[in-house]
Amino acid sequence: MKKFITEHSFLIVFISLLLLIPSIIGYQKTKINYDILVYLPDDIETIEGQKILTEEFGIGAFSFVTVENMSNHDILMLEKNIKKIKGVEQAISIADITDIAFPKEMIPDEIKNKVYKDDQTVMLVTFRGSTSEETTMEGVKSLRELVGDASKVSGMTAMVLDTRDLSAKELFAYIIIAVLLCLIVLFVATDSYLIPIFLLGNIGCAILYNMGTNIFLGEISYITKAITAVLQLGVTMDFSIFLYHKYEQAKETEKDKKKAMQLAIGNTFKSVIGSSLTTIAGFLALCSMDLTLGTDIGIVMAKGVLCGFISVLTLFPALLLVFDKAISKTRHKVYIPKFRRTQNLVIQHKGIIILIFIVLLVPALIGNKNVEVYYKLDKSLPKDLASSIANRELSKNFNIVSPELLLIDKNLKSNELNKLIESLKKQEGIDLVLSLKNMFDFGVPEDMIPEDLLKVMENDTYQLIIINSTYEIASPELEKQTKEVEKIVKKYDKNAIVAGEGPLMNDLTAIADHDFKMVNYASIFVIFVLMLIVLKSLSLPFILILTIEFAIFLNMAIAYYSGTTLPFIASIVVGTIQLGATIDYAILMSTKYLEERMKNSKNEAMRVTLSQTVPSILVSALCFFAATFGVAMYSKIDMIGSICNLLSRGALISMFVVVLLLPTLLLLFDKVVMKTTKNMKEAK
């Protein structure tokens, strides 16, 4: 295979470029999902309730529309036009039940204050499709155009639509920023002006191969789409740099450039196969999450590392051979220092370094454990988005904060239903309980209730009770209240279902807390087992994972002590990604140390190890930092910005910890490592 690559370099480059065509088509055809709630498990009760609402009531999603200074006649005309929008099921307002025979004044304040205030009227628009379906989002888009003011249309779909538009607008900028910052690092770190271009070109092709093959997954999350390119760039860059260095070293002893490249490919494969497998394993550990967003990110990123690994061993060698003369003509000085002071610092001051890290360990553990997270999805978005403005105005003017939908047995006895409604009304934080039954009690004649509203409120199996909570979505107060509501409802109907955004967010919170623990355990276990196999050592996996986990604790602790509240998904995935992506630094250093230890004393072996590995670790970490830092600074979506911010900082922290702490631990536990590692013979 090595010989084929070197003998057919032009063919490899041609085929690689040809493969970009289906990759680009696949990339464009891959569906993108912008609704995180769809990643909740299908078997939880709130999702089952959502299915019933969609399939049996035609309420896959809903929006509230606020209109001002419109007569009943105009509102009814607007409703008719709204119903013509593709995907819309119903459009209902107070105008449907009020006229001369039944004026607005006769509507009880409990209901009227929720739908009519100061010449503003709230209209409920329901959609047949789910929140993030294309027809629903296009329906909301058309609804905004019809109303004439996007900030008058609130609801989950409006938020998802704004997320889609903002993400699409920012995505190209992410890639440009990441590429430019990586170019700066590579121009400083490599010895040719062309090498950075080929490095990024090779990884760019691998990214497109990865993104193109996502079409076989059906769809991916917008978070996955946003971070995959920059993560793949940062994580796989060191593979390419390693091959280039091996090629340059081989040319010193082998005059034939093709034979030199064959040696470089073979050496690179042996050197990076272990680190690539651990990186892939780290990403696949995300698949252990109950929230299937983890599976989404994990599979795409693991596939990305594999694509990068294959490209490094095929396309990149071919590019180097095809453009060998041009590369030679564009040589320049390398500006990476030799780090001799670092070697002396680590070897001469082991005790001080260990003491510093021991002192840092306690606050790192405390900070990591107590970092605050938020689950409110719109908190991740800019406050000036149309959906954010609409939701705030709806809350401010009508106190509609967290509406919930209760699915109750239609045949529940009248007296039991009355008790249920009265019990719900007594709950603190609930200011509206609305059902057909209490609408009749309010004095609304049954024959005046429009058929559209009747279809929304009941079917052959269920009757719908709408409650409004004044507590914020994803707040502890709402979580406690929802549990109480569920207890009350189940008391009267054990098969009843509490549905809506609030209960869904409560499930998301519980599942995310569980996932945070499970995904960390899974990633540590999988990477530990792989390192046992790759390193053939009982002690090294402990030392290496301890080192990177300490770096992760420090990273999360900085968020805690700086008072940063993280979006929940960042707190779950960042630790696993940082472990999988930066364990390579530790593997590179430890394997080089073992190699040198068989020839030298431990101090001399470490001196050589640091001189040869620190520059590579520095370049890799700086590329990872550059790829993610720019995105973190630019992105207005906190869900993406926070992940990239943590990863950019994590890359630097992992670098410092590996360069300072790991050598100290290797020297401290040298005898243990020598005795517990296969085929290790200490130098005399």
Image (cartoon, rainbow, N blue to C red):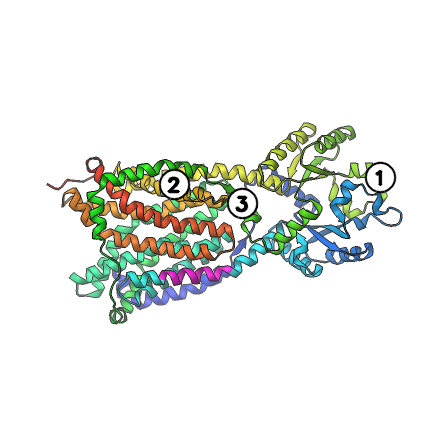
Residue 178 in the magenta stretch? The answer is yes
Query: Left of 430 or right of it: where is 277?
Result: left
Q: What residue is pinned by disc 2? A: 553
Regarding residue 284, the answer to whether it shows in the image is no
Q: Name the residue under label 1.
A: 443
Q: Residue 39 carries which label?
A: 3
Q: Nearer the viewer, residue 503 or 320?
A: 503
Query: SS at mark 2?
Result: helix
Of discs 3 and 1, which sits in the foreground?
Answer: 1
Q: In this view, does 606 lie above or below 260?
A: above
Q: Can residue 173 be seen in this view?
A: yes
Amino acid at the residue labelled 2: Phe
Which amino acid lies under the numbered mark 1 shown in the image of this protein?
Gly
**Residue 679 left/right relative to 547:** left
State if disc 2 and disc 1 touch (CB < 8 Å): no
Horizontal and vertical percent position of residue 680: 18, 40
The residue sitting at the left extreme is 684
Label 3 Cα neighbours within 10 Å, binned few <14 / some 14-19 / many ≥20: some
Q: What stretch is highlighted in magenta?
A: 170-182
Sooner in the amino-acid sequence: mark 1 or mark 2 = 1
Dot 2 crowding, Cα within 10 Å, few <14, some 14–19, many 20+: many
Would you identify the image quadrant in which residue 561 lies? Answer: top left
Mark nearest the camera among 3 and 2 is 2
Residue 554 within the segment the image draws in magenta = no
Q: Is 596 situated left or right of 73 in this image? A: left
Q: Which residue type carries mark 3?
A: Tyr
Q: Position of residue 75 (x, y in %)?
A: 78, 55
Q: Which residue lies furthest to the right in this view?
A: 101
